[in-house]
Image (cartoon, rainbow, N blue to C red):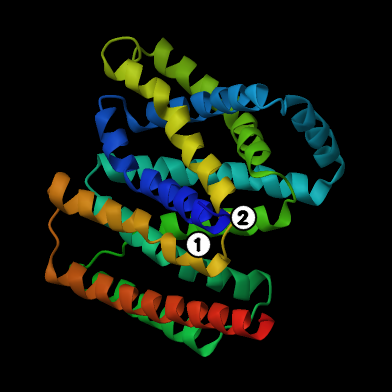
Amino acid sequence: MDNTQKGVLYTALAYLLWGILPSYWRAVSSFNDYEILFHRIIWSFFFMIIVLAVTKKLSPLVKETKSLFKRKREFIALIIASVVITFNWGIFIWAVNNNHVLQASLGYYINPLMSIALGFIFLKERFTRTETLAILLAAIGVLYMTFSVGTFPIVSVTLALSFALYGLMKKVVNINALYSITLETFFILPIAFLGIAILTADQKTYFGNNFESFLILFSGIVTAIPLILFSAGAKRIPLSLVGLLQYISPTLILLQGVFMFGEPFTLTHAITFGCIWSGLMIYSLSKWMQYKKSRKIKL
């Protein structure tokens, strides 16, 4: 297996694991959503510490952290990233356990287009014609759902916006992906411990009372493993290919929502998703053609 094939395998596995996360969160749904989020933060941090210790990267992490403190702009960006990704995790867990899986899927389909929009606003990046068309089609889909159902898809837009903002902050921070997730969970760790303490004091915690208490221990693993795979895979393949593979996750989330959790897929959903899929297809084909063209020029 050559380097590119490994890259495709690792990246596809990462998106596959992210895509089946709804089934895991449903498996621990006897916990309330806040408690699941707190456990995810805590166990993610400790699992990352174990990974870094085994790979002998704890000392470099300490050095990188000291250096980061001196780079104020990057340090602030990483703190913002920590808050935003925590918010994203919380919304996703809530969506899955409150029968909004289709909205969660829609959010991650919209995410690439939301990232383009944030790049235009904050990084002064210009839209190409295909990007403009793709964003317009996505906007039409969201507006159609809003007027048809009478409710704005707030879960979808919040997930897309928060993850796009997270990506924007990560562009500012020049740090290894494994160190980044460790520090992101570390920054929010005190709040997670405080939250667990409050739930325990109020006797609202389910930890230790059922088999799901064992399952929740794996919340760190299901968070970190896809990230590690993505970190290993994405650097081996072109960004355009990563862009195509990323649709594995929302597609799997959509399928689980319809076939496992029984959420209705109505005509409104079909038209909304159809608009967004059309936009993404146009955008992805455009990027793929750009990549093929650049390869020909290099050859």
Report which residue position mark 2 lands on. 235
Q: Is residue 5 above or below residue 134?
A: above
Residue drawn where x is 21% and y is 75% of the image: 271
Of 127 and 287, the residue lying toward us:
287
Q: Position of residue 252 (x, y in %)?
A: 28, 53
Of 240 and 72, the residue lying toward us:
240
Q: Secondary structure at mark 1?
A: helix
Q: Is residue 58 above or below residue 146?
A: above
Residue drawn where x is 19% and y is 71% of the image: 270
Report which residue position mark 1 lands on. 242
Q: Amino acid at mark 2?
A: Lys
Q: Secondary structure at mark 2?
A: loop
N-terminal of the pair, mark 2 or mark 1, is 2
- List the single residue furthest toward the front: 1
Classify mark 2: residues with Cα within 10 Å, few (<14), some (14-19) or many (20+): some
Q: How many marks?
A: 2
Left or right: residue 27 versus residue 71 is: left
Residue 254 lies in quadrant:
bottom left
